[in-house]
Amino acid sequence: MQIKEKSTFLFLVGRQMFRIMFKLFYRWDIKGVENIPKEGGAIIAPNHTSFFDPPLTGSAMKRPLYFMAKKELFDVPIFGWIIKRTNAFPVKRGVQDVNAMRHAFSLLKKWHLLLMFPEGTRSKDGKQGKAKAGPGMVACNAQVPLVPVKIENTNIMLKFKRIKIEYGEPIYPPKEFTKSDYVVMSQKVLDKISKM
């Protein structure tokens, strides 16, 4: 049974503001939205070259999107207050953050969409990084699909080039798996993105 998805007022306002910005200044080109599951939990997995990738990915979708953000950001005055109310939750970097993982699994169990980057962190040179186990691990254990997302030109936003975002067909995890499958699943997403 689909659990009704609710969004905070601040989330809805922020999403609309980003939509206006991306449409007006960057003439965003969106493809493949039909590949986003209409219901059920799923991991939305884009490549990552800019701080604008999370709001861009979420703004182009109809369903609410939840995402992890490094714990330090929640300590920043005003900004931390805002992201806490726009579907973000903290994660400690460099350690096994059990609480963050529990919250992620809880969201997927409630049939929400969760943003996770297959590369784990932002690429500073715009090139694709190495696959990390995180997204694959969550997908396998939660038994939810990974939706590859290709984002172009957010790393050169000051040049005001057209931003492109494309959602690929979902990649489903195996029913039976081992820890070695975690990186394999994340790599499948990156391979798909490179071919889109």
Image (cartoon, rainbow, N blue to C red):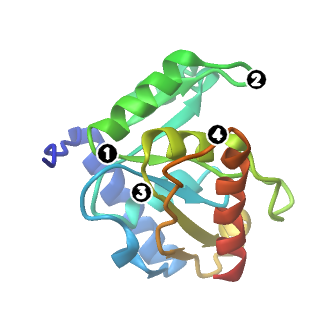
Instruction: Report x, y in % for residue 65.
Output: 37, 49
The residue that label 2 is drawn on is: 94
Q: Is residue 10 above or below residue 59?
A: above
Q: CA distance from mark 2 to mark 1?
A: 26 Å
Tell me the element at label 2.
loop
The residue that label 3 is drawn on is: 58
Which of discs 2 and 4 lies nearer the camera? The answer is 4
Taking depth in this image into account, of 102 and 173 the one nearest to the observer is 173
The residue that label 4 is drawn on is: 134
If you read the primary sequence from the N terminus, does the residue marked by circle 2 or circle 1 appear first?
Answer: 2
Q: Residue at (23%, 42%) from the top-left corner?
A: 7
Q: CA distance from mark 3 to mark 4?
A: 20 Å
Q: Quadrant of the C terminus?
A: bottom right
Question: Outermost residue toward the front?
Answer: 176
Q: CA distance from mark 3 to mark 1?
A: 13 Å
Q: Residue at (80%, 63%) from the top-left corner?
A: 128
Looking at the picture, which amino acid does disc 4 mark?
Gly
Would residue 157 appear left or right of 67 to someone viewing this image? right
In the picture, the disc for residue 112 is 1
Instruction: Report x, y in % for residue 3.
Output: 16, 43
If you read the primary sequence from the N terminus, does the residue marked by circle 3 or circle 4 appear first?
Answer: 3
If you read the primary sequence from the N terminus, does the residue marked by circle 3 or circle 1 appear first?
Answer: 3
Which of discs 3 and 2 lies nearer the camera? The answer is 2
Tell me the element at label 4.
helix
Q: Is residue 11 above or below residue 34?
A: above
